[in-house]
Image (cartoon, rainbow, N blue to C red):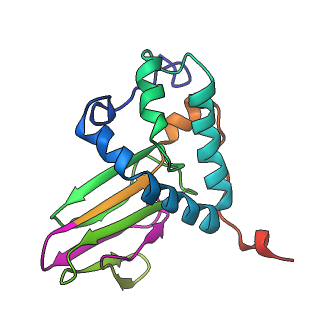
Amino acid sequence: MQSSQFKLEVSAQMKHGTAGAQWSLEMQESSALIGTILSIIHPQLYEQGMEALCHLKTENGFVDDEEELYTALKHWTPPFSALSVISNRSTLVHHDTKGCNEWIDVLVPLGEKDSTGIMDFPGLGISVKYNPSTIVGVAGKVISHGAVFEGGERGCISYYMHNKVHERLGVPAGTWMNTSIYDC
């Protein structure tokens, strides 16, 4: 089956009546804020994400269960097509695999006040504090990254886009963010 013909599917964790669906409802405002941040740090990617969501909301044929998709999208506010929740573990240095080189993933560390974290970017030769209330935007497919944590309960929400979703919906990948869009 060609990639342009495959059916998309609502993840099992987001289907009606699941804890994930309830969590999405409760996270609407926070996830919308993450989308607002993306609209500032990479406006084109934000627009592409919103275009993809618009296709899903207004066109039929992308999924087998249209009602399930409609229900999930009622509470889905970020412009991203996916998210992962990482709980109480560090992540080894890695490259992400689901997006495009030019795309930014937004990482939101969560935790207790006494928890601390470090985000390493070994290819860039830098490490940054990665504590709760920090938000990191990274081109995760291109820039290797990993995180270590200490003290207290810890988590991270990783917002990202799947390139196969955009391909299926006919939404182009776009380009690297360029600060010239801010020139007067």
Q: Residue furthest right?
A: 184
Is residue 93 visible in the rendered structure shown here?
yes
- Residue 149, image quadrant: bottom left
- Residue found 48% across the figure and 47% down from its top: 161
Res 150 quadrant in image: bottom left
Residue at image position (51%, 41%) is: 163
Left or right: 1, with 102 as reference point? left
Seen from the viewer's position, the closer of residues 70 and 50 is 70
* Residue 146, placed above or below residue 166: below
Place of residue 112 in the rendered image (x, y in percent of width and height, measured from the top left): 20, 76
Q: Is residue 173 visible?
A: no
Residue 36 higher or lower than 73, as above or below? below
Estimate the x, y position of residue 153 in percent, counting from the top left. 14, 70
Give how far across and how far down residue 129 sits, in percent: 33, 84
Quadrant into which the C terminus falls:
bottom right
Q: Which residue is rendered at x = 58% and y = 34% of the image?
A: 167
| Residue at left offset 46%, top offset 43% | 76
- Left or right, 43 with respect to 164, comes to right
Label count reads 0
Rendered view: 8 above or below 129: above
Is residue 151 within the magenta segment? Answer: yes
Residue lying furthest left: 152
State which region is magenta: 132-154
The vertical placement of 29 against 129, above or below, is above
- Find residue 172 and report its horizontal and vertical position in percent: 66, 41
Taking the image as shown, residue 37 lies to the left or right of residue 176, namely left
Quick check: 53 left or right of 149? Answer: right
Asked if the magenta segment contains residue 159, the reply would be no
